[in-house]
């Protein structure tokens, strides 16, 4: 049986009966706030395979500092596409850059870390971001 040492919040017991082998597999699946766990069984074997199902999330962010005139939007689009995120980025009249991004939680974390650096010519002084409701975007693009 698979066992995981996690901080658990919700518990689900899964029983799989295999009539061909006259056996039953029972496993406990745990769900935490960081994502969902999915269990699958191979027919004829008392083995469960555990896979992480990544949680989809969306954020909005505002990046301040020297972030305009340094290809920040262009490089943001490239980084977002590399991380398979969707959303948009735009210059604000205040001199900052605003954006929305949606994708897997792990990829968004990498993206937020990258926002603190930005492209080579940028000098980021602050990144403020918050999670937003899930939104559907076709791709990641620059808004004008």
Image (cartoon, grey):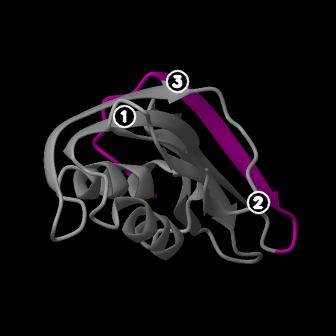
Do the CB atoms of the residues marked 1 and 3 lie less than 8 Å apart?
A: no
Q: Earlier in the sequence, mark 1 or mark 3?
A: 3
Foreground disc of the pair 1, 3: 1
Q: Earlier in the sequence, mark 2 or mark 3?
A: 3
Q: Circle 3 sits on which residue? A: 10
Q: Is residue 2 visible?
A: no
The answer to which of 60 and 64 lies nearer the viewer is 64
Instruction: Give percent across and percent down for residue 19.
Output: 87, 65
Instruction: Give percent across and percent down for residue 135.
Output: 71, 38
Left or right for 117, reference 72: left
Q: Secondary structure at mark 3?
A: strand
Q: Circle 1 sits on which residue? A: 62
Left or right for 89, reference 130: right
C-alpha gap between disc 2 and disc 3: 33 Å
* Disc ID at residue 138: 2
Q: Quadrant of residue 128?
A: top left
C-alpha gap between disc 1 and disc 3: 34 Å
The answer to which of 20 and 53 lies nearer the viewer is 53
The part of the chain drawn in magenta is 1-20
**Few, some or many residues within 10 Å of mark 1 (<14, 14–19, 20+):** some
**Few, some or many residues within 10 Å of mark 2 (<14, 14–19, 20+):** few
Is 139 magenta? The answer is no
Q: Is residue 124 visible?
A: yes
Foreground disc of the pair 2, 3: 2
C-alpha gap between disc 2 and disc 1: 21 Å
- Residue 14, above or below 123: above
Q: Residue at x 41, y 62 (%)?
A: 76
Do the CB atoms of the residues marked 2 and 1 lie less than 8 Å apart?
A: no
Q: Residue at x 86, y 74 (%)?
A: 20
Q: Residue at x 61, y 61 (%)?
A: 140
Instruction: Give percent across and percent down for residue 127.
Output: 25, 36
């Amino acid at each position: 049986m698979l066992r995981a040492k996690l901080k658990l919040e919700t518990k689900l017991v899964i029983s799989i009966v295999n009539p061909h082998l006259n056996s039953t597999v029972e496993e406990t699946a745990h769900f935490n706030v960081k994502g969902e766990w999915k269990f699958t069984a191979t027919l004829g074997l008392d083995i469960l395979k555990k896979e992480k199902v990544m949680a989809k999330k969306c954020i909005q962010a505002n990046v301040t500092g020297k972030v305009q005139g340094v290809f920040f939007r262009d490089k943001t689009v490239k980084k977002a596409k590399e991380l398979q995120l969707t959303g948009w980025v735009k210059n604000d009249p205040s001199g900052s850059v605003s954006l929305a991004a949606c994708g897997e939680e792990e990829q968004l974390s990498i993206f937020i870390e990258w926002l603190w650096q930005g492209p080579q010519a940028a000098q980021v002084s602050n990144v403020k971001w918050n999670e937003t409701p899930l939104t559907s975007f076709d791709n990641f693009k620059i808004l004008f």
